[in-house]
Amino acid sequence: MLPKGSIHRYCAYELRKMQPHDLRTIVGGASGADQKLLGFVGGIFVVDPISATYACDSDAPFTGIDANHVGIVKPSSRTDAIYTLFAKYYVTNGLQRAANAQPLRFDKTVCAFYGEASQGASAWNKDEICPLPDRDKLDPDYHQGDFNCCGGGAGSSMTNASIPAGLEVKVDGGHYWSVDHGALQGNGYGLHTYCRPEPPLGPGCNVKVKIVAHYRITPSTTAPVQ
């Protein structure tokens, strides 16, 4: 129960991601990796649902709004979903409750890595660590089943079993590339990126990695005790 006079806190979150201008906060690897990974990473949440639903009333529903960050903070009319949601709470004086709140599941790209080597250069080799924010909220029911380690004939010891519950590892590359040695390391996930170019007149190489966290949250896990 909220103490008398307390302000209710109801939460809505954006369902649509936005194409970022750069990815410098989540990428690593070769120089200019942030620009070279924009298309590979795709959209991101400006405010992810964990942040958007923090410290809400514990027995109120989370509401997803079919809009990106711009649309959710700037409704264009009174018929927009975010406007009508606010109006509903205002008119009812906050008397909106969900007896059996369902878990909210969403995915978020938490890291991206890029490596490359030019024709005739040495192979690209790098150990990477991806910090895992809110690791306690990773969805234990999510298990990746379509992991692709490598291409161009390269090999790897990694399989779907190398990726813990709640994580997804997407890999792509050019010519001869792979990722290997994936494993949890403290509060992060580590792996090794590799690609090998050919001598002249052969091609160069590149390797791209995207690590996606799949989360599951409920009102009771985000709200303080009242």
Image: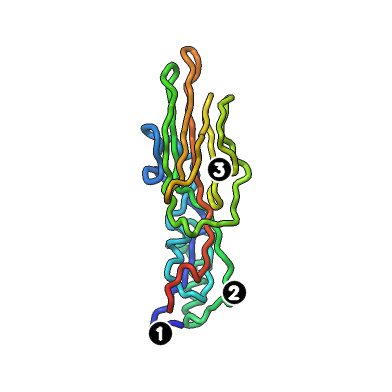
Instruction: Give me the residue at 45% from left, 48% from top.
Output: 110
Instruction: Give me the residue at 43% from left, 82% from top.
Output: 2
Report if residue 69 is visible in the image.
no
Q: Amino acid at mark 1?
A: Pro
Give the number of the mark in front: 3 or 1: 3
Instruction: Give me the residue at 55% from left, 59% from top.
Output: 105
Secondary structure beneath dot 3 equals: helix
Q: Amino acid at mark 3?
A: Ser
Q: CA distance from mark 2 to mark 1?
A: 22 Å
Question: On the rendered image, what quadrant is the C terminus found in?
Answer: bottom left
Read off the residue under disc 1. 3
Mark 1, Cα crowd under 10 Å, few <14 / some 14-19 / many 20+, is: few
Q: Which mark is residue 162?
A: 3
Give the number of the mark in front: 3 or 2: 3
Q: Depth check: 204 or 150 in front? A: 150
Counting residues from the start of the chain, the first of labels 2 and 1 encountered is 1
Pinpoint residue 162: horizontal percent, then vertical percent: 55, 42
Mark 3, Cα crowd under 10 Å, few <14 / some 14-19 / many 20+, is: some
